Image: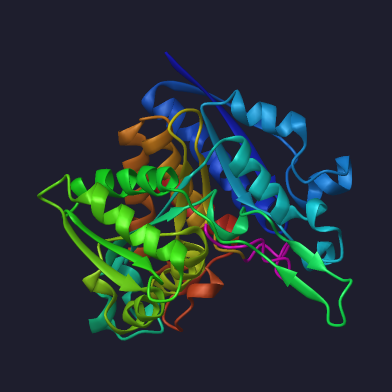
């Protein structure tokens, strides 16, 4: 029997509600497909700060490194905003990404046919959307040095450094190429090379790497135009390759094309070691504990973990089919309510999905 170790980081806010559903799904799938999965839950994010005074405790990071995959729900709450930056839940995320060398963030954006009317965009604009955002995750302005505050001047100042080297750009480009070759061999690289020197290096390096694959179709787009085009004509994109900052913004924008940010999963990967699989949404502390959160992004992140992290393809596909079946029967959570559906609680939606598996 195949055996897997999964580190579960339920985190903050709605995290425990949605991750509980994933645990039940994994239990059922392990029985159905004959594999053993050991789930070890660890403190991470705001709850870790409260219990251990560290948003990313060493014990948690060690458990993640020793696992086959990491399943992360969400972290954060406004109540932590007054903490020193290094103690905030978001800093824990950066620490986790750095510790596991998670340089590649993969965010698929796919329209699920039963939800065509849930998007704020017109049906005819979104009906053929099926794209992937490939975001560099541990470089750029979020990690660049130097950074800090200048307080010994008349006016207070703060600064960050956006920096990439060619090796960082090459390795994320290789990931985009691999994904594009499994799809339609089409990459749109997004930068701001008309203004930023770092983006000029990005564009030149992407061109150099992709030129080795003659079957690839590479286009380039400035980030402001890419944002506009994602709203105007999102179906023109297949694989979007971009930097950390731009990818952070564009992937959230793309998420809303589907009707709710509560629908989309993501994977953060390294060349070796476990990946981290998590929904793209936040911890939604305003609805935490009310049993009304949408668990589907977490459920689909579990599917990505099974497919990419554990190579359990059939089990992963089973989840995808179950989600589509539940949606096609008219069941929705409150964020997807269009007035013509049956609204379920978070736990009820989880039970419906599990029944379909």
Which residue is farthest front? 153
Residue 152 occupies quadrant:
bottom right
From the image, which quarter does the C terminus lie in? top left
Question: Seen in the image, is 267 located left or right of residue 180?
Answer: right
Question: Seen in the image, is 238 located left or right of residue 25?
Answer: left
User: Bounds of the magenta span?
Assistant: 280-292
Comparing 95 with 167, the one in front is 167
Comparing 86 with 302, the one in front is 86
x and y percent of residue 36 in the render? 49, 21
Comparing 134 with 147, the one in front is 147
Residue 217 on the magenta span? no
Question: Seen in the image, is 53 located left or right of residue 276?
Answer: right
Q: How many marks?
A: 0
From the image, which quarter does the N terminus lie in? top left
- Residue drawn at x 63%, y 36% as measured from the top left: 99
- Residue drawn at x 43%, y 55% as measured from the top left: 135
């Amino acid at each position: 029997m195949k055996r897997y170790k999964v580190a579960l980081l339920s985190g903050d806010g709605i995290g425990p509600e949605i991750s509980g559903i994933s645990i039940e799904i994994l239990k059922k799938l392990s029985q159905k497909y004959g594999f053993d999965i050991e789930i070890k839950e660890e403190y991470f994010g705001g709850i870790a700060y409260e219990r251990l005074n560290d948003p990313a405790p060493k014990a948690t990071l060690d458990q993640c490194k020793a696992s086959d995959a990491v399943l992360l729900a969400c972290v954060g709450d406004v109540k932590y905003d007054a903490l020193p930056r290094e103690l905030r839940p978001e800093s824990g995320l950066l620490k986790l990404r750095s510790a596991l060398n998670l340089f590649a963030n993969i965010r698929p954006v796919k329209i699920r046919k039963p939800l065509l009317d849930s998007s704020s965009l017109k049906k005819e604009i979104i009906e053929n959307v099926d794209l992937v955002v490939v975001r560099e995750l541990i470089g750029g302005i979020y990690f660049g040095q130097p950074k800090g505050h200048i307080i010994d001047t008349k006016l207070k100042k703060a600064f960050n450094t956006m920096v990439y080297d060619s090796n960082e750009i090459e390795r994320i480009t290789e990931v985009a190429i691999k994904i594009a070759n499994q799809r339609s061999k089409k990459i749109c690289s997004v930068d701001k090379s008309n203004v930023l020197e770092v983006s000029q290096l990005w564009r030149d390096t992407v061109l150099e790497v992709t030129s080795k694959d003659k079957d690839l179709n590479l286009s380039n787009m400035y980030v402001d135009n890419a944002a506009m085009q994602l709203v105007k004509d999102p179906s023109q994109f297949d694989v979007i390759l971009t930097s950390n900052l731009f990818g952070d913004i564009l992937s959230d924008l793309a998420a809303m094309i589907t009707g709710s940010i509560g629908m989309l999963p993501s994977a953060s990967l390294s060349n070796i070691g476990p990946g981290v699989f998590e929904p793209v949404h936040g911890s939604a502390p305003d609805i935490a504990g009310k049993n009304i959160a949408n668990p589907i992004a977490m459920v689909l992140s579990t599917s990505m973990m099974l497919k990419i992290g554990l190579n359990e393809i059939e089990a992963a596909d089973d989840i995808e089919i179950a989600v589509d079946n539940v949606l096609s029967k008219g069941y929705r959570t409150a964020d997807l309510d269009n007035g013509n559906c049956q609204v379920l609680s978070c736990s009820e939606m989880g039970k419906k999905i599990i029944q379909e598996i």
